[in-house]
Image (cartoon, rainbow, N blue to C red):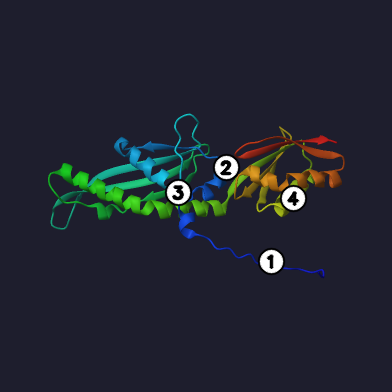
Amino acid sequence: ISRGQYYVIIEAIVDAGKLLNDVNFYTQVLGQPVFSINSENDKKSDWVIDELERLGFTINDGKKKATHTFYLKQRQSNVEDHKGSKGIETTLSIVLKDNKNGNILFTINNNPMKTRIYVQPVSRAKQVSEHVAYKQMKKKMGVEVIQSLARHAEKGIVYQIVLKNAKRTDVDIFKHVLNNGTSGNVETWKWDKKYKTMTLDYRFSGPLSEAFDQSLKEIYSTFKKEGKGRRPHMKKVDSDAAYFDIVRS
């Protein structure tokens, strides 16, 4: 084969139906998530759990600390139509939040206007309106949860890579290998003079451990060739950060 630039085209057949119900394909970007439920309507907690488990989520049994929480929010309001008839509408939302940083990954809302019920007594209107709202949410959840997770996975997560006692040349090696040896990229970096650390903000679509599965050997190899007597010592990799000491060889 002659030297030059080549393009490789890979074609794949994807079972969209199977993928739609496989949330694990998308939640891997969250690392090893543990999901919990927080419901404003205790009577609907089991409903939420059932619907999420149907999609493929595993809900925490309380033995582990949850990393992410699904919040079910419900509100019923009085409404009045053009004839002056009084009724009830129900507003529902399901929110997925990262418990560590408070970031909201997605919010799914129903259409309250289509839950307006004008019957008497009011208790009956509330019951029927609520039923319609949850029927709406059941229909929307599958597609919108997967689409939201897919967008989040495509965007990736910004992880921190902390280098203690690092010089600019050490940072350059990490940047070069991570940018070229993984599917992620180093976006920014900052120096902490007090603690003598350099922190890289590294965006990657997948668990941080996966990024180092792709790059750690190359990092060590590059330091051996270009590190000028210095090498990285990995201390630990958490779900959201990795820590290295730069030491003399």
Q: Position of residue 25 (x, y in %)?
A: 53, 50
Would you say the residues marked 1 and 3 are in contact, meaning their CB atoms lie under 8 Å apart? no
How far is the residue under mark 1 from the one under mark 3?
Answer: 35 Å
In the drawing, does residue 102 fall left or right of residue 230?
left
What is the number of the mark on residue 88?
none
For the residues carrying marks 1 and 3, which lies nearer the camera in this image? 1
In the drawing, does residue 34 fall left or right of residue 3?
left
In the drawing, does residue 232 fall left or right of residue 225?
left
Q: Secondary structure at mark 2?
A: loop
Would you say the residues marked 3 and 2 are in contact, meaning their CB atoms lie under 8 Å apart? no
How far is the residue under mark 4 from the one under mark 1?
Answer: 22 Å
Q: Three-letter amino acid code at disc 4? A: Val
Sooner in the amino-acid sequence: mark 1 or mark 3: 1
Would you say the residues marked 4 and 1 are in contact, meaning their CB atoms lie under 8 Å apart? no
Q: Residue at x 67, y 38 (%)?
A: 242
Sooner in the amino-acid sequence: mark 1 or mark 2: 1
Residue 19 makes an appearance in the image: yes
Q: Position of residue 222 (x, y in %)?
A: 81, 47
Q: Which residue is mark 1?
A: 8
Q: Three-letter amino acid code at disc 1? A: Val
Q: Residue at x 56, y 54 (%)?
A: 154
What is the number of the mark on residue 31?
2
How far is the residue under mark 3 from the one under mark 2?
Answer: 17 Å
Q: Three-letter amino acid code at disc 2? A: Gly
Q: Three-letter amino acid code at disc 3? A: Phe
For the residues carrying marks 3 and 2, which lies nearer the camera in this image? 2
Q: Which residue is mark 3?
A: 106
Residue 89 makes an appearance in the image: no
| Vertical relation: 198 (above or below) 25 | above
